[in-house]
Image (tube, rainbow, N blue to C red):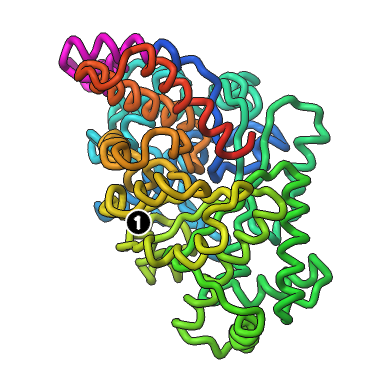
């Protein structure tokens, strides 16, 4: 069989158990959720795609450049980001033919064997573009031409794909400095697709963020508040949160190095803030400030109803040389050991029992699932567990998450699945993987007589659709 004729096929039973009894149950459960609408309550797709509804340029621009899961693997094997045409931090990029960048992906696609990226991309190739041969060096140009030509057709415009994917709602993520112009354009267009935003204040709450001084200045200009005084700074946040809520936001998102929270007095908080804005804060001061901000954001959530998400435990931009040249989000972020029990106690002492407050916790430290996160969520009414995230957004990671959180957290203290992706076309694939893994997991419980099949059939619909809608107030 020649390279060009190696088939690309998606097996109907992928991710289901090889045990016939479990597989049969999983098939029946999957039939309940396979065609449910997609709720994508947290992610990083670009709202300008849906506002302008312009054709995507080519296969490389759509499927390679925005996806750090893909280019980090290639980089790990010695392929430079310049060779792939990844934009640099100053907005420039190497003069690379996008077809040549795609050829690099095709020639090295074997690197992804068995990885989630392989599953997601093959799903896109097969189901979205109708390709039936595998991607490799011999089919690279065939793929590039087929995909790029398809992207110029009306059926592949962003809004058409949104509807084809049966997406009921998608949430993007913007900083407080974003004018949300694209969201306004979407609403004004009369299009029925529901695209909302989420409030991500990292640049104006992290003194160690490289943009903090300039972002704080712009924060004041946008809001008209004195953001160099503690009370004015807090008012500016309340103002922008209200603006985001008016644009459809139902949640905030916080990407902190740790889960630390604090409960300083107003005088102590003001004194700390003065030190931060003076530029004299130490690393310990910066950590304490981030900790206090989380508690302040929780207080604001109790007032305005926005659901709070916390994504801690990531060493951002670990490859300093890469960061200096290309900026953030270039595949060099690494998981950190993360503690939650002591870290969250100041915030939970104030808000953990409040029925009007909701905090969704994520982790990159799987060792905390059964030791800390599940017991916390299994007790505090305000706490819920986000799904397996980032490095663990894979069949094995999803299975471990369910296995280790079930006993003390149950299913209904979790929030279903969110894809957390910049790669728009991978959204159906990612949700399909999550649904299949949940079907396989529940099928095992049914086969072991730990749950009746009618209970599993109800539960799998909740996990795929009802829980994310409820958790994010959608």
Q: Viewed as shown, does residue 327 lie left or right of 303? A: left
Percent from the top left, x then y, of residue 285?
A: 50, 83
Residue 104: in sight, yes or no?
Answer: no
> Magenta stretch containing residue 171, yes or no?
no
Q: Is residue 205 above or below residue 9?
A: below
Quarter of the figure with residue 212: bottom right
What residue is drawn where x is 62% and y is 66%? 296
Q: Badge 1 local density, few (<14 within 10 Å), some, or many (20+)?
A: some
Q: Depth check: 46 or 240 in front? A: 240
- The x, y position of residue 417, in whole percent, is 45, 35
Q: Quick one: quadrant of the C terminus?
A: top right
Q: Is residue 263 above or below residue 359?
A: below
Residue pictured at 76% horizontal, 68% vertical? 235
Q: Quadrant of residue 40?
A: top right
As helix, strand or loop, the secondary structure at mark 1 comes to: loop
The residue beneath circle 1 is: 80
Residue 336, how many percent across, how many down?
32, 62
Range of magenta residues = 1-30
Indicate the quadrant containing the N terminus: top left, top right, bottom left or bottom right: top left
Comparing 105 with 433, the one in front is 433
- Left or right of 345 on screen, residue 20: left
Q: Residue at x 22, y 15 (%)?
A: 22
Q: Is residue 433 left or right of residue 145?
A: left
Can residue 23 be seen?
yes
Residue 280 at x, y = what percent? 56, 90
Q: Is residue 21 located in the magenta-colored stretch of the structure?
A: yes
């Amino acid at each position: 069989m020649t390279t060009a004729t190696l088939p690309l096929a998606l097996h109907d039973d992928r991710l289901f158990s090889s045990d016939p009894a479990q597989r049969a149950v999983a098939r029946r459960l999957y039939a309940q959720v396979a065609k449910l609408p997609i709720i994508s309550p947290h992610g990083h797709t670009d709202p300008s795609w849906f506002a302008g509804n312009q054709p995507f340029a080519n296969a490389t621009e759509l499927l390679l450049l925005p996806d750090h899961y893909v280019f980090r693997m290639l980089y790990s094997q010695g392929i430079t980001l310049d060779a792939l045409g990844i934009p640099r931090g100053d907005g420039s990029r190497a003069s690379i033919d996008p077809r040549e960048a795609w050829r690099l992906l095709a020639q090295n696609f074997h690197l992804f064997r068995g990885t989630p990226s392989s599953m997601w991309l093959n799903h896109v190739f097969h189901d979205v573009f109708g390709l039936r041969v595998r991607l490799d060096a011999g089919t690279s140009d065939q793929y590039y031409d087929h995909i790029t030509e398809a992207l110029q057709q009306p059926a592949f415009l962003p809004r058409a794909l949104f509807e084809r994917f049966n997406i009921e709602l998608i949430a993007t993520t913007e900083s407080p400095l974003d004018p949300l112009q694209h969201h306004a354009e979407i609403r004004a267009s009369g299009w029925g697709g529901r695209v909302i935003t989420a409030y991500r204040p990292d640049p104006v709450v992290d003194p160690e963020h490289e943009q903090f001084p300039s972002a704080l200045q712009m924060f004041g200009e946008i809001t008209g508040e004195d953001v160099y005084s503690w009370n004015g700074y807090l008012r500016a946040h309340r103002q922008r949160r209200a603006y985001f809520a008016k644009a459809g936001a139902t949640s905030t998102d916080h990407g902190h190095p740790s889960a630390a929270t604090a409960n300083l007095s107003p005088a102590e908080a003001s004194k700390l803030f003065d030190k931060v804005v003076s530029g004299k804060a130490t690393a310990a001061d910066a950590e304490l400030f981030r900790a206090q901000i989380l508690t302040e954001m929780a207080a604001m959530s109790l007032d305005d109803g926005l659901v709070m998400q916390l994504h801690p435990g990531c060493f951002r931009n670990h490859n300093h040389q890469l960061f200096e040249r290309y900026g953030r989000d270039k595949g060099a972020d690494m998981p950190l050991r993360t503690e939650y029990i002591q870290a969250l106690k100041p915030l939970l002492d104030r808000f953990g029992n409040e029925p009007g407050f909701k905090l969704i916790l994520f982790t990159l430290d799987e060792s905390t699932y059964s030791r800390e996160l599940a017991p916390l969520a299994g007790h505090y009414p305000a706490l819920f567990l986000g799904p397996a995230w980032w490095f663990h957004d894979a069949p094995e990671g999803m299975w471990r998450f369910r296995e280790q959180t079930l006993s003390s957290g149950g299913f209904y203290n979790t929030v279903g699945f969110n894809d957390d992706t910049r790669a728009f076309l991978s959204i159906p694939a990612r949700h399909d993987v999550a649904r299949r893994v949940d079907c396989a997991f529940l099928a095992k419980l049914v086969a072991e007589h730990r749950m009746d099949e009618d209970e599993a059939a109800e539960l799998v619909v909740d996990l795929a659709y009802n829980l994310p809608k409820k958790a994010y107030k959608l």
